[in-house]
Amino acid sequence: MVEIKELDADRFDIAASMLKAMAHPMRIAILKHLEGNKRSTVTEIHELLGIEQSTTSHHLGILKDKGVLCSKREGKNTFYFLKYEILSQIVDCLQTCACE
């Protein structure tokens, strides 16, 4: 039996929190859109997905709060992007599994 160290347990909690934040159809769509080091504003994302800007901001806030996304302000715009590009592999895996 493998013993989980306390430090590992903390890391698993963070990972689970990130996965929970990603576990929403619109958030998966946002992450899919941001693959490949792409950066987008709230306006670009809400227009792409056809949802309210306030709803888009809410989803982006959750993803940012849980460490999935980062943002950078440039002038009047705030650009959102994946904090770790490797997270796109999770989205790709989910897409592959859901399409079988």
Image (cartoon, rainbow, N blue to C red):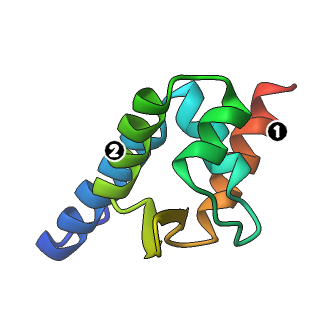
Task: Mark 1 vs mark 2: give the one in front.
Answer: 2
Q: Position of residue 13 (x, y in %)?
A: 24, 55
* Residue under label 1: 96
Residue 21 is left or right of residue 43, and the answer is left
Furthest residue toward front: 76
* Number of other residues with Cα within 10 Å of mark 2, as a class: few under 14, some 14 to 19, many 20 or more: some
* Residue under label 2: 62
Residue 16 is left or right of residue 68, and the answer is left
Seen from the viewer's position, the closer of residues 1 and 13 is 13
Dot 2 falls on a residue whose secondary structure is helix
Q: Position of residue 93 (x, y in %)?
A: 73, 47
Q: Position of residue 44 (x, y in %)?
A: 66, 46
Residue 84 is left or right of residue 59, and the answer is right
* Number of other residues with Cα within 10 Å of mark 1, as a class: few under 14, some 14 to 19, many 20 or more: few
Residue 99 is left or right of residue 58, and the answer is right
Write down the quadrant of residue 20 in the picture. Answer: top left
Q: Residue at x 12, y 70 (%)?
A: 6
In the rendered image, the quadrant that contains the C terminus is top right
The image shows a total of numbered marks equal to: 2
Could you tell me the amino acid type at mark 2? Ile
Could you tell me the amino acid type at mark 1? Thr
Dot 1 falls on a residue whose secondary structure is helix
Furthest residue toward right: 100
Seen from the viewer's position, the closer of residues 84 and 59 is 59
Q: Residue at x 63, y 70 (%)?
A: 86
Seen from the viewer's position, the closer of residues 24 and 4 is 24
- For the residues labelled 1 and 2, the Cα–Cα distance comes to 24 Å
Q: Residue at x 43, y 68 (%)?
A: 70
In the rendered image, the quadrant that contains the N terminus is bottom left
Which dot marks residue 58? none
